[in-house]
Structures are given as structure tokens and as C-alpha cells.
Image: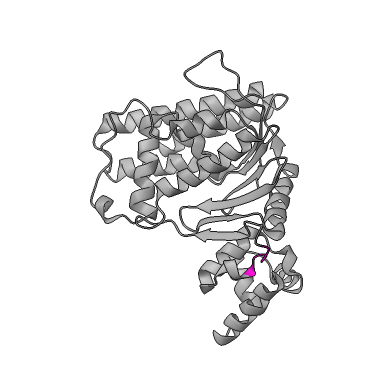
């Protein structure tokens, strides 16, 4: 049924007085030749590209899913502060993690636009800051509109169990510059805008972000996941890749011996969960392409890790933080 997507796309752009190829090229930041290839062969459309087009043209993606009642097909959920909140999202994420833990030899492949959600949960002040941004900037919760970030006195994040469970599953993560820098930009912006309660709160958040980056780079060196509070703990196998390719959203494949589930998510576009062949294949293909065009930072990638770490410190100096 994926072929019907481009048919509906053509109908909508025609009503708008636009050429479909030109519309796609502009929206997806690709050439018109690349847009024509996607129009002629809808299977070439990546899942994140379909989400972006659907959001722009108000298209219900669930109508293009497999109709087999035994399949999850496609679920599209828009993040907001009322009907599908961040709590609902983390609950769904945890259910996918639990499924992987239940089935031995499962693996998660994570294309990260931002730092993977699980890592924030180790650091309560950083986790509270990221949650504050979600509520204020993306979910548009009016309770946060005129608030400043006051920090937290909690000694652990309410979702720390997500971080603990993530330790148990073999994972490949693909990071880019935006993954590494986006939280730095957020911390800098909130500091310059006077949205931290005080300098101490700002420094605590920044310090915990440094701790997070230290932990992930150490994981890459060892090839194992780590618990920052248990120095001798070694979790499941871990590989970290760095890619120059741009990741539109956070794209995750949960791969168990039973099935593959694709989850594409971001605060802006919401969450898409699917076991539909096209969604899984297009997401998985994009992640594999990013790995192939990237650099392995784990174990043997010592020089690449050092270079990226220096770039991170240089970025902090440039931003004055």
C-alpha cells in the first residue's frame, strides 16, 4: 500500500499548485532528481522522509500500513502535554526494552539525532533539565511557559530504570555532530536567556552533561556499557559510530529473534512505531548506510575518539561554557 502514498502526495501538491518533485526537493533538502526517483519508486522513501511529508501535508500514515491483523503495522502518535505525554512515551520505550530483554540475543540499533534518552536518566539534574525543555519547548505545556529551570533535589531520575535496563541489551549507536552538540546549545541558550535559577544550577547541569559524555566515550573504548555508579560493572556489548550524515529524527530498530520493530521519534514529529516491512527496511537501511559512511569509534577507533573529544572541548570553548 506504500505506493498509494505518492499518489496522495501528487494529488495534494497538485491542489496546492505545486510540482511534486519541487515540493519534495525543498522539504527534504534533496535534488529534484532524487525526488523524482522517490516518486517513481515509493519504496525508496525513507521512513523519516515520509513522516516529514505527512506532517507537512496532514496525511494519516496509518492508512498506508499492512492490514494483517497479526502485525503491529503503523502507529503514529503526536507528543503533547495532554493525550500522549513524555510519560506515555517513556512507558512505551520501556515496553520495547523489556521485550528485547525477554528475548535473548536481541539488539538495538540507534541513530541518534540527540543523545539517546537512556543516558540522561543516570544524571538527575541533567534529566530534569531535558524534561523541562521537552515540556516547555516541544509539548508546549502552558504550566512551563513562564517558568525558569530551578533544578531538582531528587537523587535519581524517575526513569533511571530505563538506563538500568538499557545496560542489558547489545547496542549499536550512530552519532553525529548534532548528537554531541545539541544539548550544549540548549544549555548555552538557557544560560544566556536567564532561564536557569542561578549559576550553580547551570554549572550542575553542564557538569552532568560532561559526565555523560565521559561515560559514553569510555563505553566506546571498552566496547561495553557502563553504570556510572558501579565502576567495575560491565554491561552488554556496545559499538559507537560517528557519521557526517544528517539524521532527521531519532531512529531505532529493536531486533529480537522474534521480530524487528522500527521506532522513529522526536519531540517535533512525535513517535512512529511499526513492524511494517517498508518502515523497518527503510529505517534499517538508512542506519546501515550511516554506519558504512561513518567511523567506528569503539575499541580500535582510538584516534577518532580523541579527535572527536577534542572537537567537543573546542566547541565548549567556542560557546564560552
**Observer-nearest of 231 and 274:** 274
Q: Position of residue 271 (x, y in %)?
A: 52, 55
Q: Which image quarter is the N terminus in?
A: bottom right
- Left or right: 249 with respect to 186? right
Q: Which image quarter is the C terminus in?
A: top left
**Observer-nearest of 9 and 25:** 9
Stretch in magenta: 64-68
- Asked if residue 18 is positioned above or below residue 175 in the image, the reply reads below
- Left or right: 26 with respect to 302? left
Q: Position of residue 184 (x, y in %)?
A: 44, 39
Q: Position of residue 114 (x, y in %)?
A: 52, 44
Q: Position of residue 123 (x, y in %)?
A: 41, 29
Q: In terms of image quadrants, where is residue 158?
A: top left
- Left or right: 50 with respect to 203? right
- Can residue 321 be seen here? The reply is no
Examine the structure image and report whether residue 21 is included in the region drawn in magenta.
no
Examine the structure image and report whether residue 65 is included in the region drawn in magenta.
yes
- Can residue 135 be seen here? The reply is yes
Going 70% across and 56% down the picture, which residue do you hit? 282
**Observer-nearest of 63 and 183:** 63
Q: In terms of image quadrants, where is residue 237?
A: top right
- Left or right: 199 with respect to 305? left
Going 46% across and 59% down the picture, which residue do you hit? 78
Amino acid at each position: 500500500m506504500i505506493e498509494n502514498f505518492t499518489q496522495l502526495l501528487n494529488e495534494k501538491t497538485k491542489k496546492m499548485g505545486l510540482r511534486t518533485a519541487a515540493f519534495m526537493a525543498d522539504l527534504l533538502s534533496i535534488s529534484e532528481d532524487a525526488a523524482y526517483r522517490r516518486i517513481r519508486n515509493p519504496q525508496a522513501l525513507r521512513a523519516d522522509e515520509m513522516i516529514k511529508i505527512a506532517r507537512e501535508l496532514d496525511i494519516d500514515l496509518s492508512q498506508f500500513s499492512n492490514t494483517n491483523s497479526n502485525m503491529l503495522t503503523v502507529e503514529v502518535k503526536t507528543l503533547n502535554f495532554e493525550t500522549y505525554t513524555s510519560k506515555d512515551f517513556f512507558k512505551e520505550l520501556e515496553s520495547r526494552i523489556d521485550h528485547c530483554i525477554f528475548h535473548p540475543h536481541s539488539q538495538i540499533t540507534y541513530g541518534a539525532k540527540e543523545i539517546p534518552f537512556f543516558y540522561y536518566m543516570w544524571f538527575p539534574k541533567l534529566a530534569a533539565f531535558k524534561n523541562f525543555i521537552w515540556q516547555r519547548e516541544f509539548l508546549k505545556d502552558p504550566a512551563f511557559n513562564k517558568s525558569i529551570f530551578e533544578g531538582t533535589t531528587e537523587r535519581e531520575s524517575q526513569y533511571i530504570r530505563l538506563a538500568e535496563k538499557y545496560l542489558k541489551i547489545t547496542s549499536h549507536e550512530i552519532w553525529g555532530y548534532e548528537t554531541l552538540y545539541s544539548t550544549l546549545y540548549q544549555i548555552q541558550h538557557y544560560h544566556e536567556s536567564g532561564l536557569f535559577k542561578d549559576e550553580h544550577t547551570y554549572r550542575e547541569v553542564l557538569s552532568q552533561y560532561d559526565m555523560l559524555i565521559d561515560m559514553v566515550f569510555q563505553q566506546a573504548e571498552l566496547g561495553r556499557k557502563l553504570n556510572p555508579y558501579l565502576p567495575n560493572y560491565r554491561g552488554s556489548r556496545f559499538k559507537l559510530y560517528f557519521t557526517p550524515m544528517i539524521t532527521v529524527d531519532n531512529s531505532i530498530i529493536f531486533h529480537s529473534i522474534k521480530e524487528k520493530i522500527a521506532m522513529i521519534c522526536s519531540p517535533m514529529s512525535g513517535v512512529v512505531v511499526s513492524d511494517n516491512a517498508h518502515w523497518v527496511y527503510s529505517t534499517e537501511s538508512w542506519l546501515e548506510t550511516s554506519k558504512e559512511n561513518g567511523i567506528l569509534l569503539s575499541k580500535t577507533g582510538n584516534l577518532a575518539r580523541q579527535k572527536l573529544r577534542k572537537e567537543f572541548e573546542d566547541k565548549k570553548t567556542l560557546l564560552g561554557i
